[in-house]
Amino acid sequence: MRLLGFLNLRGISGQIAALVVASIVAIHLIITATFVIHRPDQVDPSVGHGHSQLAALVQLLGAAPPAGRPQLYADIARAFPQLHIESLPSGTVAPASEANGPNLRNLQRRFGSSYRVFSLTQEPGDRKVGIALPDGAMISARIPPEQWQRPFWRGPWMTTLLFAVICVTLLGLWAARALTEPLSSFARAAENFSLNGAAAPLPERGPAEVRSVAKALNRMRERITTLIDDRTKMLAAISHDLRTPITRMRLRSEFIEDEGQRSRMLGDLDQMRSMLESVLSFLRNDRKLESMTLVDVASTLQLVTDQFADMGHRVTYQGPEHAMATVRPDDLHRTVTNLVENAVRFGAEAIIRLMVAPDIMTIEVEDDGPGISDARKEFMLEPFVRGDNARNMDEAEGFGLGLSIARSIVTAHGGELSLHDRDPHGLIVRIRLPVRQPSRRAAA
């Protein structure tokens, strides 16, 4: 059963095995085709033909009587001018050394032991040889250059190696892409995972192991989404049920004769209602289905500035008059409003600053309050954290959800929110948002 599973082409192991077999078969086919075309086992016929002609003519001169050789020289010169067969002057002595080189040894074997072959001169692309006939006469001839010998890099071995490397490289690249692309899609899907249903489910394709992982991740996302939905619905039901007794208690508190007790009771009830609304707002933020639209962010920030200025706060805006970006307008307005509320609560004035780059938009909300210590900056972004002693507030002023909601909204936009110190004192909340949001298909 394990062997059958290994050979299953739907799995990764089977595909790797098929890739190896296909590579081996392709290499063998390339080698076979190359050797069939080049036939390195066969000698170039032009070489053997030229040697045969020279051997036949020399043997003809050796068998002819000396008186008839001048006529033969003339006939050979007309019929075979490329061989340049001529008679050497009398007195020329053949060297005692044996013929060197493959061509000379080949000619020596063709002529036989009664003939002697030796080299006269060597020129680029040409070779002149001398031949001693059986009766002692000497002749000279030229053999054609060795054009049939190819350099190594043009031979069949290098061609075969080159094609084999190309074949294996292409198959390897294809296998790497086919096997890693599903894993890359898993990473992108996990990075863009959200609870608002914007991202499409993982495609269940590829090898069997990859499909099973995709199915498991899709089921896990469905369970997480269901869990969050159930939690939100449960808390919404609790909030709805608690509003009725809170309303009854508020009505009854109106009949309390003591003015101080009545004010404290109404304050506690207002705080309970505000707490319920803040918690529900935080829980429902990830489920908000507001669509991304092209918005003038600069106008939104100026609107927030005017709203707080109308309430008597010292809030100013610094930045361009217009700056377009793809965002959720209500969420962006809510985020900046939360940050400015914190700024005016702990400082005398606040500055909203906008800086625009080709791909990134930076929004800063700056205050001149006591600031936050470095050790608690990251901790302050957690839900229900109200700050250290320097930025503490009483329970009627907040529940520690403003920064958490703001960071949740910024993260849903694909950006980041961070806290920085202001010189000489104060806090800067910096938001970095992408100007253009990736398409849904790319995110999936």
Image (tube, rainbow, N blue to C red):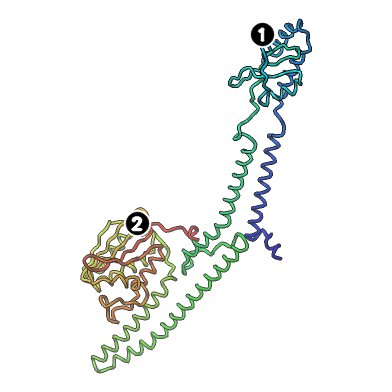
Q: Is residue 309 visible?
A: no
Report whether 249 appears left or right of 119: left
Mark toward the viewer: 1 or 2: 1
What residue type is disc 1 on?
Pro
- Decide: is 213 above or below 44: below
* Residue located 23% across and 91% down the image: 260
Given residues 316 and 72, the one toward you in this image is 72
- Decide: is 270 above or below 204: below
* Residue located 74% across and 24% down the image: 109
- Decide: is 4 above or below 171: below
Given residues 426 and 402, the one toward you in this image is 426
The answer for how far apart the CA atoms under marks 1 and 2 are is 101 Å
Which residue corresponds to mark 1? 89
Residue 120 lies, in percent from the top left, at: 63, 17
Report whether 100 appears left or right of 213: right
- Decide: is 366 above or below 164: below
Q: Is residue 295 visible?
A: yes
Which numbered tag is attached to residue 324? 2
Query: Looking at the image, is mark 1 or mark 2 earlier in the sequence?
Result: 1
* Residue located 59% across and 53% down the image: 175
What residue type is disc 2 on?
Met
